[in-house]
Image (cartoon, helix red, strand yellow):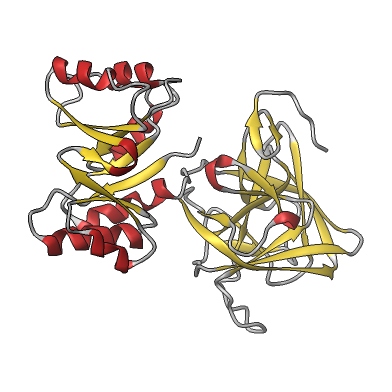
Amino acid sequence: MDKEIWVRADVPDSKEERKNLVLSALESGIDTAIVRPGDEDFAELGKVKLLVNDGGVLSDGYEIVELSTPEDQDRAMAMAGKKTGVILDSSDWTIIPLENLIAKFRNSGTKVLACAADKEQAKLYMQTLEKGVDGIVVSTRDPNAIRGFAGIVSGTADVQLQELEVLEVRNIEMGDRVCVDTVSLMVPGEGMLIGSQASCLFLVQSESEDNGYVAARPFRVNAGAVHAYVLGPEGRTRYLGELKSGEPVVLVNRDGTTRLSAVGRCKIEQRPLILMTATDGQSTYSTILQNAETVKLVTKDGSISVSSLKKGDRVMARLESGGRHFGMKIDETIREI
């Protein structure tokens, strides 16, 4: 289940402050906000779902429980199976163990969300007892702090990249290449994770560098052949040939940080292709890319065009064990060659 992300915009006494919290939420990709009675006009700010807090009881069958004593915990637990969802707020989770509440609500049919003041808290709550809470309610009076939750909203997590040594680069037959134009501007060292095997995705850089012949197009990743995997939200993979306008894609920087964007359009065209193989010293991996000067792989300190790529060069990639089933990671031995 995807995690829900809301913002609590009902706390400040000033309506202008509450409005600014909703605005920041929308700018961060959060489209659900808890508001006070009389704040329904915030719906004019954009496409946002407003849940009115009337004495702790929200529309849509949710209730806020302020936790400060063990008795509060008992009251919250009694709601399992009786409410659509319960929003838990505590200034001291050492008094009320979140694990107890998550365990109680699991499989009860009642969602459990937890208020978090910062990104680190949110990550902890989403991982508690492996499954974590069903959602996070951002609880802060600082509109700028809300923007720090953008990575969590996107469902992206930072990835670990490592250097692989290139073994071979050779021309193959013409094929269908996918060029992904996103709705975001990227920087050198940033692109998408692409590969012929889900166990190894190479960081293909955006066309964010001017090469003297073609103007930079920093919104574009000349990604690879239609069969290749691309890393998407929630750690899932997609086939490049399946991507469509409006769908989410994950942008990755050389330091492993990620952010979410969306496909503006995809262009599939017949182009000359190359096969590149590389190794981590134990296994061999590959990907197929267009043979063009503008297609570059990210290195530790820069980038290198596939037209000048050679044996011994080192490029950045993400490795993982296990296999994939409909894009989801599974613990199964699968060999893709």
Residue 140 position in % (x across, y down): 19, 48
Above or below 233: residue 330: above
Depth check, front residue: 213 or 328:
328
Depth check, front residue: 68 or 186:
68
Task: Return the residue found at the far right.
Answer: 173
Place residue 106 in its image quadrant. top left
The reply to whether residue 119 is in sight is: no
Residue 53 position in % (x across, y down): 20, 45
Above or below 60: residue 24: below
**Does residue 218 appear to the left or right of 228 in the view shown?**
left
The C terminus is located in which quarter? top right
What residue do we see at 55% from left, 72% from top? 218
The reply to whether residue 5 is in sight is: yes
Q: How many marks?
A: 0
What residue do we see at 78% from left, 63% from top? 177
Depth check, front residue: 9 or 317:
9
What residue do we see at 17% from left, 50% from top? 10
Depth check, front residue: 188 or 302:
188
Residue 145 position in % (x across, y down): 24, 53
Residue 293 position in % (x across, y down): 71, 72
**Does residue 259 appear to the left or right of 235 in the view shown?**
left
Task: Return the residue found at the far left.
Answer: 13
What residue do we see at 36% from left, 58% from top? 48
